[in-house]
DNA sequence: TTGTAAGCGTTATCAG
DNA sequence: CTGATAACGCTTACAA
């Protein structure tokens, strides 16, 4: 042995903790690669070898190192999702759908929150790409220039969720927020409402809200009704903000006959504000929401709203990513999961549903 | 060159897509390790070298490969969290706290849902360990035997959240669910209530619910009041289930004066059921909840509840993990974040708060 | 301050 | 069906 052998010994790193594939291999009397084959596709290994390896794994409690696997195979089993905020329950439901499908297929879910900021989203996309995810889920179809560029050049498949109006960067899953809002407002007009207010989230960095607002404007304009700036209020996604916006409309615009809320959060908060003031629903004012949260069904009266496929958006996104991950075959690029207007007691019913 | 050189050439893998550190190094005219130093601690690199590297990174859009980094350094920047379900907003808030602190410190968050199953939790712990996370967050202090063993032997620091009654496996953050429930019920008794019902989540695989139930029993028993099995109902975490349980109690036990709900979800669902039936709150029946969801403040009347530090549990868990990750110094093992009984209009006030 | 060499734990590739 | 070897992209250890 020459001096480099000595040097090599000195340079050896500290031993690491976990057992590894070679420990299993030694115990089973096979090579590491055979254990690797057993783990990834047991069918490639002979029956008796299989049994010895299984016994060895069980004995030493071997847990594969996905980091090493990821580096070696150049693919991880991690899917990254970037959502505005997990505390909005529509995104929690989406994440649940993602999580359920992914874990059934041996994938893990990395979550991060952009806080409805496109700059933050771009940073997170970069952070996620650093993890070399097998797939990426983002919210909406509007991104910062930098974010969009990263998504366009990343190797992993990308799904944009919750809106399908534009051409996707790669794939998209959701429904038309414009159509949903348009149909909701058109229904209100059919029901006899003429002076209809709007409570909507700020449309900055939120194309879903922007499309819902546009749907309202198009329906009002299309019916030849007045569009009054004072009838429209911004609100952040809290019940309190919904109540505040409703209170302002009630104070300043007693002429309003119905309030269209671009989120059930506003509708519920707003409806509670009405209760507090003794404003009767739907006798004194009609209220409709958006998203069909469980609470809208429980409310007194139950709230008219738009049912959206929030859990299904997660499920379908995961399924599409998995399809692309497991094969090169082209899958659907644009998936419309639809929506449904649900007429309940908080508004008069439209003529078509009478 | 001997034949092995030829073989090596044949064995070369396909080139991969992303730019890597050596591309940056070449462009900047330095070695890879210098770029590595620049990325991990720019102070170790000379000013002008720094500038050249920065320019090179910017030019080719280099994004570090955290998988390779993780394997090489034997530490990832991923924290794994296992929660019962993301759709219960208390856990969504916790996740938000985790996410905020972790991303400030360059860590990413891997989320998985156990669905209130200890077996599922154990599987997920194993899946998470395979990713070699820098830290692990689990919910509660009760685990399956296998899950507990994995948590005890894993190298990463572990935080158990939402309950601090038992000795932690490693660290725990939360509050005493027993004390909170005990104090709530004691307060109701002080307020003059004697016949108090309970709506609680199934206590299987949920030590937080179990402790809340025990707190109720201890307070009732301690005050010499009747403990009637029929006054206690199980409910899953939906508003509908809360309403159903409340309906049953209202139907079967007209003698009840107050209902203690071990979750605001039950309290809100239950209170809506009361509204539906024309049962007045608090005149006909007192209702209190647990968790202090935003909606409890908005409700008419506002609901008495227990404020719990849900966002802070996430924040603190992340902070404790980070402290342990960055140093070997011992940090607190058991952190009591406390709780606060919030008396609102859905119950008569206790004498002590008059 | 910078560089060289070895190694992280797994899998791709080629060979038998 | 099984194995030997190199490689994945980065960092550790050591050296200059």
Image: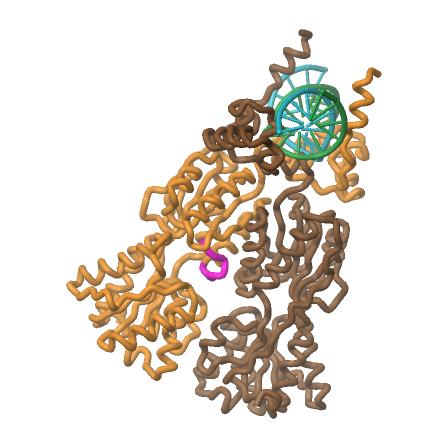
Chain colours: A orange, B brown, C cyan, D green
Q: Is residue A103 left or right of residue A35?
A: left
In the image shown, does A25 or A128 lie closer to the viewer?
A: A128
Q: Nearer the viewer, residue B11 or A320?
A: B11
Can the viewer see residue A90? yes
Which part of the image, by quadrant, shows the C terminus of chain A? Answer: bottom left
Q: Position of residue A63 (x, y in %)?
A: 71, 42
| Image position of A57 with respect to B221: above or below | above
Q: Is residue B4 left or right of residue A266?
A: right
Residue B145 falls left or right of residue B308: right
From what the image shows, is residue A209 above or below residue B192? above
Magenta-colored segment: predominant secondary structure: loop
Residue, far right:
A1
Q: Is residue A353 a member of the stretch shown in magenta?
A: no
**Does the image show residue A41?**
no
Residue at screen point 62% across, 50% down: B79
Q: Is residue A89 magenta?
A: yes
Please report the residue visible at 73 percent of the width from the left and 57 percent of the height from the top: B331
Residue at figure coordinates x 29%, y 73% from the top left: A249
- The part of the image, by quadrant, that contains residue A184 is bottom left
Range shown magenta: A84-90
Residue B254 appears in which quarter of the rendering?
bottom right
In this view, the residue farthest toward the top is B1
Residue at position x 61%, y 84% from top?
B197
Looking at the picture, how far across and down is residue B307, in whole percent?
57, 73
Along the line of sight, the residue nearer the viewer: A7 or B150: A7
Q: Residue furthest front?
A: B47
Does B333 appear above or below B284?
Answer: above
Camera-side residue: B198 or A273? A273
> Which image quarter holds the N terminus of chain A?
top right
Q: Quadrant of residue A130?
A: top right
In this view, A184 is above or below B150: below
Where in the figure is residue B232, as x and y percent of width and height? 63, 80
């Amino acid at each position: 042995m020459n001096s480099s052998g000595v040097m090599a010994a000195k340079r050896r790193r500290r031993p690491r903790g976990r057992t590894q594939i070679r420990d299993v291999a030694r115990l089973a009397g096979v090579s590491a690669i055979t254990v690797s084959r057993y783990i990834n596709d047991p069918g490639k290994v002979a029956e008796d070898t299989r049994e010895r390896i299984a016994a060895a794994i069980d004995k030493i409690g071997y847990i594969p190192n996905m980091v090493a696997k990821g580096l070696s195979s150049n693919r991880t089993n991690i899917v990254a999702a970037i959502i505005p905020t997990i505390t909005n329950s529509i995104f929690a439901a989406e994440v649940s759908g993602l999580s359920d499908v992914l874990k059934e297929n041996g994938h893990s879910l990395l979550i991060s929150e952009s806080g409805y900021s496109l700059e933050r989203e771009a940073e997170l996309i970069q952070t996620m790409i650093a993890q070399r995810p097998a797939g990426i889920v983002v919210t909406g179809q509007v991104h910062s220039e930098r974010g969009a560029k990263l998504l366009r050049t990343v190797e992993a498949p990308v799904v944009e969720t919750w809106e399908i109006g534009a051409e996707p960067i790669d794939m998209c899953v959701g429904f038309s927020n414009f159509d949903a809002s348009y149909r909701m407002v058109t229904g209100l007009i059919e029901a006899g409402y003429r002076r209809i207010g709007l409570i909507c989230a700020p449309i900055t960095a939120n194309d879903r809200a922007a499309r819902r607002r546009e749907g309202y404007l198009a329906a009002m304009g299309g019916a030849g009704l007045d569009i009054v700036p004072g009838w429209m209020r911004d609100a952040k996604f809290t019940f309190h903000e919904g109540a505040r916006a409703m209170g302002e409309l009630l104070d300043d615009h007693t002429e309003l006959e119905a309030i269209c809320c671009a989120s059930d959060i506003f509708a519920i908060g707003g409806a509670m504000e009405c209760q507090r003031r003794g404003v009767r629903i739907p006798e004194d004012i009609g209220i409709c929401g958006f998203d069909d949260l469980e609470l809208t069904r429980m409310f007194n009266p139950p709230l008219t709203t738009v049912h959206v496929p929030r859990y299904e958006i997660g499920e379908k996104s995961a399924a599409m990513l998995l399809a692309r991950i497991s094969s090169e075959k082209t899958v659907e690029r644009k998936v419309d999961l639809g929506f449904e207007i649900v007429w309940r007691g908080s508004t008069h019913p439209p003529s078509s549903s009478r």
